[in-house]
Amino acid sequence: MSITATPAAVRAPKRQRGHLRVAAILEAAGELFQEKGYDAATMTEIAARSKTAIGSLYRFFPSKELLAEALMEEYAARLLEEMDAVIARTERLSPRQLAESLVAYRLALKDRRRAALALLESASGIAGKRDRLRREILPRMVRIIAQARPDLTPARAEAMAPVVLHLLKAVSEYDGASVAADVTDLLTVYFSREG
């Protein structure tokens, strides 16, 4: 199964209204998993927070485990999609614009990342997805670095990718505009260097 595949037992909505309902369920589940943890959050609370009838919730997500898996898959898909969008623009961006783009996508996914981390720390059986997601993120960051810094050897771009990813994690983990600004400044300097 690919990291972005929808779990087989999850019923895909057919109409726009169903898509909106699933989005509301995923949003509510992410909030509750983040606030209470996976084990403490209940399907009843998720239904109430998403303003969904419990029967509708179970129709789309027959179990909390499948809901958690779908939430993780949705986060992974959005993260990879955002990285691919940055890759497509990297060569046209100034070092500052590239740094701002990377920080912006991390900020946009901050709450989703926190919910995904709450799931990964649980015993919900989806912890293995973290390694698969890392295997998909790392080559994308290598590609961004290689495009932004053509002066680097491929080995050096590979060595720097985890460093850049860790800097971007700081944006997601710490609140405050100053952290985002500092990471943007650091990445701008890094992407500006040549030789």
Image: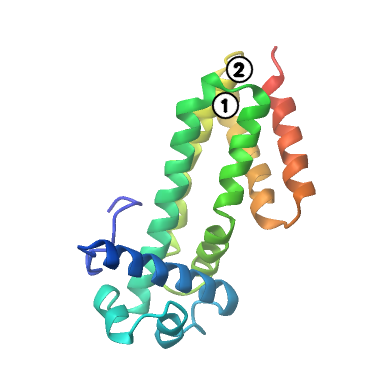
Vertical arrangement, residue 164 with respect to residue 177, above or below = above
Q: Quadrant of residue 88?
A: top left
In the foreground, 13 or 160: 13
Q: Residue furthest left?
A: 14
Disc 1 element: helix
Vertical arrangement, residue 171 with respect to residue 153, above or below = below
Q: At x 59% / y 47%, what residue is drawn?
A: 106
Disc 1 marks which residue?
145
Any part of residue 162 in sight: no
In the foreground, 28 or 141: 28
- Residue 124 lies, in percent from the top left, at 42, 73
- Residue 35 lies, in percent from the top left, at 59, 76
Q: Is residue 160 left or right of residue 38?
A: right
Disc 2 element: loop
Any part of residue 167 in sight: yes
Q: At x 75% / y 33%, what residue is drawn?
A: 186
Answer with mark 2 or mark 1, whichever residue precedes in sequence: 1
Vertical arrangement, residue 187 with respect to residue 41, above or below = above
The amino acid on which the numbered mark 2 sits, given as a three-letter code, is Leu
In the foreground, 35 or 128: 35
Disc 2 marks which residue?
152
Q: Are marks 2 and 1 in contact (CB under 8 Å)?
A: yes
- Residue 90 lies, in percent from the top left, at 53, 25
- Residue 179 lies, in percent from the top left, at 76, 48
The colour scheme used here is: rainbow
Q: At x 50% / y 63%, what residue is drawn?
A: 116
Q: At x 71% / y 28%, what residue is drawn?
A: 188
Label count reads: 2
Q: CA distance from mark 2 to mark 1?
A: 8 Å
The amino acid on which the numbered mark 1 sits, given as a three-letter code, is Ile
